[in-house]
């Protein structure tokens, strides 16, 4: 009895002390609850045959039927494969290109660094829609720059938007291009925080720049590279929606390579109004994504507990 | 001795030349594609039809721009919508993020850990598109309103993390002495914390602005009325519908007897919609860089 009373009094006292701050955070908290936690009810949508007019409570239960449809359709395999494969390609190539360029950028003088950073940041500021225009400029079947050059040199024009096989390269290229400024900056900021004394003593000892890069810079970067890579793997089930929806121009012929879980769910909701399969796919994505993040975070913790997400 | 020094310097200059060449090429690769669009927009339509796109226009003409600007009602509307949404969204978003980050950064706040967990858990697990759609369209009745264009995107746990990083460097003693002087929490936030964390606020504000200006998803997913078409979505529609306009049905609807310049007009619209952003945002690029560097070191 006494303890309960004491706890209540302490709670009230604490609350009085902290109510002002709570008040300040309140709008944000309300927002988070409404827009981030309420949608979690969506976990039950795949288990119902959701009808928009009936609403959530009155739509009938169908158990795992939606998941049956989803898992027996070939679509699921295709979109999962595309999501994972493309994300893996993105991780590998973005990391390699960014690290190498960051290493080179470190060698360049201050003024030049500013200029190059500015130019390399240009792609970061344009939207994927504008990027899709640029890609058309290159790949348009009749007038695109590439086909014009091909025809000029006596070769056949290629129907870029009808051949899925080229899009592994195209998408990776575009993704790396767009993120250049940003990604290089991340690794570059690690490099400039390294004590220049290391490099000076290495130069005195006669080490070449290449050796310095390999034995000083890279190990220092290894940390950041690991963190970035593992975090990226943790979100491997989520795609860069803007990229996959806009750049391939939603061409059906390219779906074997460009259709990912996000675009599939989007089409199902927006175009077909099919909440069953799309919510099942969404739950599938959220669940696997969650497990992956937890697992990869555990791994990050083992490597360097400071830099895990939590 | 002297010779080897000369040799090293020559070697160094060679390697620097290589590196600079590399970066010049990379920079060109970043700028030229944008030049391509500008060039196409300034090219003559007939020349395009017979010879294709080129990096430098073979026949300079402003025809495409004239056509697009004479029919610019939708362009103006989209600009208006995009500007309103960007300003509203950035201001509100920055307010939400900053207030929350400030409260979490205060070590003497009792509920700090619970709230941190609540906020950062959202980064791990989200309900997905379907429940969001149902929430916003059905329950909040925001479908086909301007609110759908920015309200769903006002919060970002990652930005909270960044902002918290900026705020953490403010010493607790400042807060304590302010409280001793009898200041209320709100006042401390506004008069002490925010001025000290100005680069952070600016960075988050810029991130939000960029996000809202470039957003195409919210408009596409939640609205269908033309009046809410923001710039990016206008571009998407232009891309898919301009083909229709140049077809037989389209020409019948079009009053003018002149041929509607399809290809160059597409690109002209793109430049008119995206051009200003290309000039404005690089200007703020230094703040991005500063903010990211500071934030990533602390976060």
Image (spheres, rainbow, N blue to C red):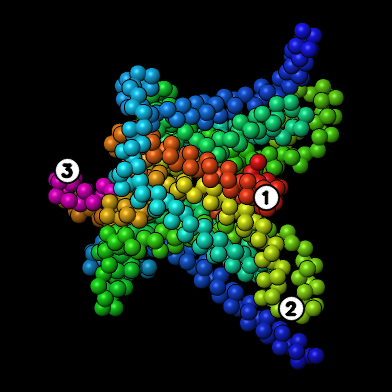
Nearest the eye: A201 or B191 = A201
Q: Which mark is residue B45?
A: none
Of circles 2 and 1, which is in front? Answer: 1
Q: Position of residue B65 (x, y in %)?
A: 33, 53
Res. A302 mark: 1
Q: Are marks 2 and 3 in contact (CB under 8 Å)?
A: no
Residue at horizontal 64 percent and vertical 33 percent from the top: B117
Where are the magenta residues, as a range? Answer: B238-255
Asked if the residues shown at circle 1 and circle 3 are in contact, with their CB atoms under 8 angstroms apart, the answer is no
The residue to which callout 2 is attached is A207
Where is residue B84 drawn, in percent x and y?
47, 35
**Residue A294: quarter of image:** top right
* Image side of residue A120 versus residue A259, left or right: right
Pointer 3 residue: B253
Residue A258: image location, x then y, percent: 36, 53
State which quarter of the image contains the C terminus of chain A: top right
Disc with the residue nearer the chain's start (2 vs 1): 2
Residue ID at (67%, 84%): B11
The answer to whether residue B68 is seen in the rendering is no
Q: Is residue B244 magenta?
A: yes
Q: Secondary structure at mark 3?
A: helix
Chain on which label 2 sits:
A
Give the main secondary structure of the magenta stretch: helix
On the image, which quarter does residue A17 sit in? top right
């Amino acid at each position: 009895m006494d303890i309960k009373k004491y706890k209540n009094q302490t709670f009230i006292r604490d609350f009085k002390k902290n109510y002002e701050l709570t008040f300040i955070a309140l709008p944000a908290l309300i927002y988070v609850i409404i827009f981030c936690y309420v949608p979690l009810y969506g976990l039950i949508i795949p288990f119902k045959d959701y009808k928009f007019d009936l609403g959530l409570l009155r739509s009938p239960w169908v158990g795992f039927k939606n998941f049956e449809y989803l898992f027996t359709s070939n679509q699921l395999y295709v979109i999962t494969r595309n999501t994972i494969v493309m994300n893996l390609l993105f991780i590998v190539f973005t990391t390699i290109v960014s690290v190498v360029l960051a290493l080179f950028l470190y060698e360049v003088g201050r003024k030049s660094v500013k200029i190059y950073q500015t130019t390399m940041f240009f792609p970061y500021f344009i939207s994927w829609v504008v990027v899709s225009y640029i890609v058309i400029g290159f790949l348009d079947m009749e007038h695109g720059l590439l086909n014009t050059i091909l025809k000029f040199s006596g070769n056949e024009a290629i129907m870029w938007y009808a051949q899925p096989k080229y899009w592994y390269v195209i998408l990776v290229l575009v993704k790396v291009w767009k993120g250049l400024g940003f990604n290089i900056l991340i690794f570059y900021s690690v490099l400039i925080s390294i004590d220049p004394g290391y490099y000076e003593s290495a130069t005195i000892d006669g080490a070449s720049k290449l050796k310095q890069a390999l034995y000083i810079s890279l190990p220092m970067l290894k940390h950041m590279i690991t963190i970035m890579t593992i975090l990226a793997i943790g979100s491997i089930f989520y795609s860069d929606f803007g990229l996959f929806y806009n750049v391939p121009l939603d061409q059906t012929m390219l779906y074997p390579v460009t259709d990912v879980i996000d675009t599939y769910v989007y089409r199902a909701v927006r175009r077909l109004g099919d909440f069953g399969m799309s919510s099942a796919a969404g739950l599938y994505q959220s669940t696997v994504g969650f497990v992956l993040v937890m697992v990869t975070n555990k791994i990050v913790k083992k490597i360097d507990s400071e830099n895990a997400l939590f | 001795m002297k010779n080897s020094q000369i040799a090293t310097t020559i070697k160094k200059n060679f390697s620097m030349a290589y590196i600079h060449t590399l970066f010049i090429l990379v920079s060109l690769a970043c700028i030229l594609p944008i030049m391509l669009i500008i060039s196409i927009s300034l090219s003559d339509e007939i020349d395009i039809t017979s010879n294709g796109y080129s990096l430098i226009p073979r026949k300079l003409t402003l025809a495409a721009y004239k056509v697009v600007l004479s029919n610019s009602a939708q362009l103006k509307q989209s600009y208006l919508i995009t500007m309103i949404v960007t300003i509203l969204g950035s201001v509100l978003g920055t307010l939400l993020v900053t207030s929350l980050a400030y409260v979490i950064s205060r070590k003497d706040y009792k509920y700090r850990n619970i709230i941190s967990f609540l906020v950062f858990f959202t980064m791990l697990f989200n309900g997905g598109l379907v429940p969001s759609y149902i929430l916003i369209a059905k329950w909040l009745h925001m479908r086909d309103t301007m609110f759908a264009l920015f309200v769903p995107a006002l919060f970002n746990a990652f930005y909270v993390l960044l902002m918290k990083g900026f705020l953490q460097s403010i010493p607790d003693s400042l807060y304590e002495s302010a409280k001793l002087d009898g200041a209320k929490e709100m006042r401390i936030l506004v008069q002490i914390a925010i001025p000290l964390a100005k680069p952070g606020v600016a960075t988050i504000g810029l991130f939000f602005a960029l996000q809202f200006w470039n957003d195409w998803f919210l408009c596409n997913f939640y609205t269908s009325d033309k009046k809410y078409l923001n710039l990016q979505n206008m571009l998407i529609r232009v891309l898919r519908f301009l083909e229709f306009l140049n077809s037989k049905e389209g020409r019948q609807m079009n009053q003018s007897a002149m041929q509607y310049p399809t290809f160059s007009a597409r690109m002209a619209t793109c430049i008119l919609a995206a051009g200003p952003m290309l000039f404005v945002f690089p200007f703020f690029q230094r703040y991005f860089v500063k903010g990211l560097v500071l934030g990533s070191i602390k976060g």
